Image (spheres, rainbow, N blue to C red):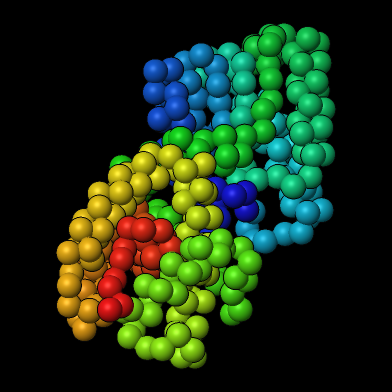
């Protein structure tokens, strides 16, 4: 799947993809009076919906994971079949109120072979040639007819809004597969030293304790993955990122005050655990409608790791 789709929880089947696309078009083309066409009582006439200015769209999501060649072939065959259906359904489309079609959008989660773009151009030329030869037969198609291949990335703002405003049951899954062995070279030495000092103060163990090294390695890995997750969120879901960033910044100041005003080093671990639990509750309260539980736990751990790495969270060791 394309990068934005990797965040969507669960497998995206055809019905779910169609539902998502229709929701995106409702938002994107609201001022163009987008109208969805249910696939009942005679079918959808080869399109999922249309706008008053002649934009129509058709969805396709593969039934399973295909290799690049198979994916292209399935997308090519689907595009070909749907364009044929579009050309043969002129009267039905006009009865539904579809204006002369200027743009036909082929909605797919992703493509991995540029031949699908070339194939779209071939079909576009065929449609225009047929229109020129028999204008009255194809009067439901504009003289300026275009075919565009649209992928999930083209609807990033709409998908973000749909998830953020709970217009769907769909949730983001930000949890990632962590490495068994941490690459410490990816983390600045000062950050490593900060994490080691603070974790050591919480655990109250000697610097050569093997458990300390293990925990420090875990938090370094979390710190690195947290940067990646936040960068991806900012790129693909900027509104969600902004809400999360504001919460994190607000709570980070609170954490700084709590830990710096804390004078009993024997209770460092209690304070640390309280901070973890309280922050998770805050994340769940604000983000559980749009993020999976695994994502919330991941974010909690990653952001706490960032507080350990910088100067936000400080525990006295003496």
Residue occupying image coordinates x 65% and y 12%? 142
Is residue 24 placed above or below 132 in the rendered structure?
below
Front-most of 13 and 2? 2
Q: Is residue 55 above or below residue 195?
A: above
State the residue at coordinates (81%, 16%): 129
In this orientation, which residue lies closer to the viewer: 192 or 103? 192
Residue sitting at 41 percent across and 89 percent down?
Answer: 206
Is 316 above or below relative to 155?
A: below
- Image location of residue 51, percent across then percent down: 48, 21
Report the residue at 31% width, 52% height from top.
248
Hey, which residue is sitting farthest front in the picture?
A: 318
The answer to whether residue 269 is left or right of residue 122 is left
Q: Can you see residue 187?
A: yes
Q: Is residue 86 left or right of residue 30?
A: right
Instruction: Report the number of discs.
Output: 0
Q: Position of residue 191 (x, y in %)?
A: 49, 63
Residue 67 on image: x %, y %: 76, 59
């Amino acid at each position: 799947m394309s990068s934005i789709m990797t965040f969507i929880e669960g497998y995206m089947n055809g019905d779910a993809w169609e539902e998502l696309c229709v929701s995106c078009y409702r938002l994107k083309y609201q001022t163009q009076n987008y109208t969805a066409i249910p696939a009942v009582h005679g079918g959808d006439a080869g399109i999922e919906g249309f706008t008053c200015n002649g934009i129509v769209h058709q969805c396709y999501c593969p039934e399973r994971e295909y290799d690049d060649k198979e994916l292209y072939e399935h997308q090519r065959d689907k595009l070909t079949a749907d364009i044929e259906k579009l050309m043969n359904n002129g009267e039905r489309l006009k009865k539904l109120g579809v204006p002369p079609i200027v743009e036909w959008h082929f909605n797919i989660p992703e493509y991995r072979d540029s031949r699908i773009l070339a194939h779209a151009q071939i079909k576009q030329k065929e449609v225009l040639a047929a229109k020129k030869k028999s204008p009255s037969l194809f009067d439901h198609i504009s003289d300026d007819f275009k075919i565009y291949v649209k992928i999930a990335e083209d609807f990033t703002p709409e998908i973000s809004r749909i998830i953020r405003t709970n217009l769907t049951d769909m949730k983001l899954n930000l949890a990632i597969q962590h490495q068994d062995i941490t690459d410490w070279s990816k983390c600045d030495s000062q950050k490593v030293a900060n994490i080691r000092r603070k974790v050591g103060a919480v655990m109250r163990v000697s610097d050569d304790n093997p458990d300390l090294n293990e925990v420090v390695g875990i938090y370094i890995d979390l710190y690195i993955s947290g940067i990646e997750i936040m960068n991806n969120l900012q790129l693909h879901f900027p509104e969600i990122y902004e809400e999360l960033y504001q919460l994190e910044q607000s709570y980070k100041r609170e954490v700084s005050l709590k830990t710096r005003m804390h004078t009993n080093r024997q209770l460092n671990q209690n304070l640390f655990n309280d901070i973890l639990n309280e922050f998770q509750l805050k994340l769940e309260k604000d983000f559980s409608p749009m993020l999976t539980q695994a994502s919330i736990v991941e974010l909690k751990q990653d952001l706490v790791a960032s507080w350990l790495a910088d100067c936000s969270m400080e525990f006295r060791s003496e």
